[in-house]
Image (cartoon, helix red, strand yellow):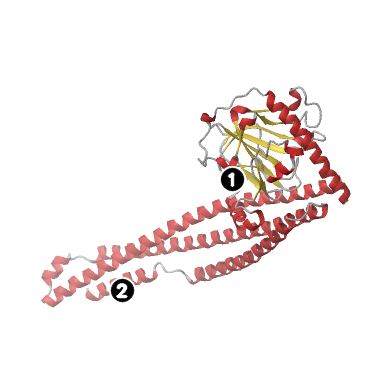
Amino acid sequence: MTSRRYTLIFLLLLVASIGIAPTFAFADAASDLQAQIDANNQQLASLKAEIAAYQKQLDTISVQKSTLQSTVSSLSLSQKQLATQIQVTQNNIASANLQIKQLTLSIGDKEASIATSQDVISKQLRSITENEQMPLIATLISSVSLGDAWQSVDEAVQFNRALSVNIENLKTVRTELATNREKVTAKKAQLVSLQNDLTVQKRSVDANKAAQQQLLTQTKNQEANYQKLIAQKEASEKAFEQDLVNLQGQLNLIVHPGLLPKVGSGVLSWPFSDAFMANCTQRKSVFGNLFCVTQYFGNTPFSTANPQIYNGHGHNAIDIAAPIGTPVYAALGGTVLGTGNTDLVRGCYSFGKWIMISHGNGLSTLYAHLSEIDVTKGQQIDSRQLIGLSGMTGYATGPHIHFGVYATEGTEIMTLRQFRGAVIGCADATMPVATLTAYLNPLSYL
């Protein structure tokens, strides 16, 4: 009996030590997958360095005088940068797939280890039930000496300890199994997000190419034609601003400041991704601020230096530099009040493609100069939902987004022709207009 018990204890201890160990096949496969993941990560580091180099060139061009050549070069560099970002996303997708395979392999190994260990324990317990005819107390009483009795007790203790160790090991493996399954679920969610990013990035490339082609078509690749186009935009913007000022004075809308969110409440988010804003922080030397803002709200140096455009009323939003095709997100959830494209009206250079969203808290936000619009009037949207892509439509001599905040009750969406005096230029373009008191500083709510 003693020999049988020692054998049993040895087998249980053996199961506890090797029952959950990975197989050689699993180890080899896992090693191969990890090698592929490491290779992907090395390539990612190289691609990110390439993206940073493109960004440095773009920043250099942005401070130069606006010429056709600099604008075309900027668009070409943006396309190259986007192509590299697409490679980064594709690499991240490949890495995520490899990690899912790695975790799935580990899950299979853990499940096999659990099954094997449980099977061995079951067999040994059945063996005890079948062969152990005499209870432990009877064994102690029948022992020929006290030493034999203590040996029987010690064997029983060792058996129980071995069984407990094995059970604890099983619990540990099951916990690892559950953790790996959760990681697979998270990786699959990440995979979906990366696939969405890839779709947007490819659209961004298309938007860049379209903008470049349109510019070259308009200017016939001649610098003189480009400068003439800029002058036309400025003249059109001047006429638009004059009509808008006339209209603002006729709007019989009253704004109640007490119904607006408290200044400094931070109810709005920046209309770009966290990654984009983090990149702005790193480019403070380029813009002089942490947010890629090229023009602030109110009587800014640019608006003061260009009274022929702003009529002395200052800038009614903030401008944020963003390459054509940059994803634009809703600053807060709400309802789309309207969308439009003022470029459809010949000779009207103002908002270009725009979106306005009412947030139900007294505020509405405007996103203008877009290249793509992804929402429709009346649509309910969530905070941080993708609503379009940045661009250079309307009155814009460089890619950026015009981000405005309005008091909703002092704002209407209409054509300027609806009021007397608006007969040329942007008269038939549908857009948001507001009383002067309805224009709010976006920085008060970001």
Residue 440: image quadrant is top right
The three-letter amino acid code for the residue at tag 1 is Trp
Crowding at mark 2 (Cα within 10 Å: few <14, some 14-19, many 20+):
some
Residue 433's image quarter? top right
Observer-nearest of 238 and 352: 238
Which residue in the structure is indicated by mark 2?
A: 10
Q: Quadrant of the N terminus?
A: bottom left
Residue drawn 18% across and 70% down? 153
Q: In the picture shown, does residue 138 fall above or below 293?
A: below
Instruction: From the top left corner, tell me how far across and down residue 78 is, in percent.
Output: 73, 55
Task: Point out residue 257 in the picture as x, y percentages from the top left corner.
Answer: 54, 30
Q: Amino acid at mark 2?
A: Phe
**Residue 270: numbered disc:** 1
Note whether residue 371 is visible. Answer: no
Residue at mark 2 to residue at mark 1: CA–CA distance:
65 Å
Q: Position of residue 80 (x, y in %)?
A: 73, 58
Where, by quadrant of the figure, is residue 351 drawn? top right
Marked residue nearer the N-terminal end (2 or 1): 2
Q: Is residue 266 above or below residue 425?
A: below
